[in-house]
Image (cartoon, rainbow, N blue to C red):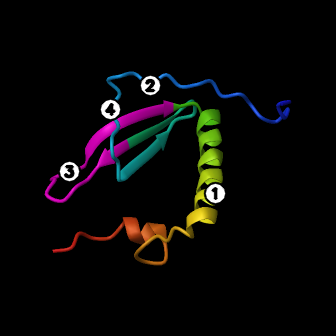
Amino acid sequence: MAQNSSERKIPALELPQDLEANYANLARITHSPSEFVFDFAQMLPGMKAPRLMSRILLSPLSAKLIFKALGDNLAKFEASYGEITIPGSSSLADSLFQPPKE
């Protein structure tokens, strides 16, 4: 079968036997002119502070390609399983930046 010229062949990934999967429910993204830094953390009930689980550094081009791939995959997911709704207020900023509940 001929490969479409716009498709890229992705090499198979080698999974090390000691690879650990980490759950993250919090992400912080920062950037400089030359790189994006993605910090993935875990915040669970009873924890005093989020625990950093992984830090990924990417070039701006790689970050843009991942952004596009994530959008494509979210669209496919929602087409199969329905819209993902964000709970809470009307905006992401309102959801993220609320004073702590006492």
Q: Quadrant of the C terminus?
A: bottom left
In the image, the segment drawn in magenta is 40-57
Location of residue 52 in the rendering, given as x and y in whole percent from the top left corner: 29, 40
Residue contact between numbered discs 2 and 4, judged by CB atoms under 8 Å: no
Residue contact between numbered discs 4 and 3, judged by CB atoms under 8 Å: no
Name the residue at 64% across, 57% down.
76
Q: Is residue 76 left or right of residue 17?
A: right
Q: Quadrant of the N terminus?
A: top right
Which badge, 2 or 3, is on the more N-terminal residue?
2
* Of labels 2 and 3, the one closer to you: 2
Q: Which residue is mark 3?
A: 49
Confirm whether the magenta stretch covers residue 43.
Answer: yes
Location of residue 33 in the rendering, given as x and y in whole percent from the top left corner: 57, 34
Q: Which residue is mark 2?
A: 15
User: Amino acid under label 1?
Assistant: Lys
User: Which quadrant of the view contains residue 20?
Assistant: top left
Residue 25 in the image: above or below residue 92 = above
> Considering the numbered disc 1 on the image, is that residue within a helix, a strand or a loop?
helix
User: Amino acid under label 2?
Assistant: Leu
Which badge, 4 or 3, is on the more N-terminal residue?
4
User: Which quadrant of the view contains residue 75?
Assistant: bottom right
User: Amino acid under label 3?
Assistant: Ala
User: Amino acid under label 4?
Assistant: Glu
| Separation of residues labelled 2 and 3 (CA atoms) | 31 Å
| Separation of residues labelled 2 and 1 (CA atoms) | 25 Å
Mark 3, other Cα within 10 Å: few <14 / some 14–19 / many ≥20: few
Location of residue 23 in the rendering, given as x and y in whole percent from the top left corner: 33, 46
Name the residue at 59% across, 49% down.
70
Which badge, 1 or 3, is on the more N-terminal residue?
3
Q: Residue furthest front?
A: 1
Q: Is residue 77 left or right of residue 40?
A: right
Q: Which residue is mark 1?
A: 76
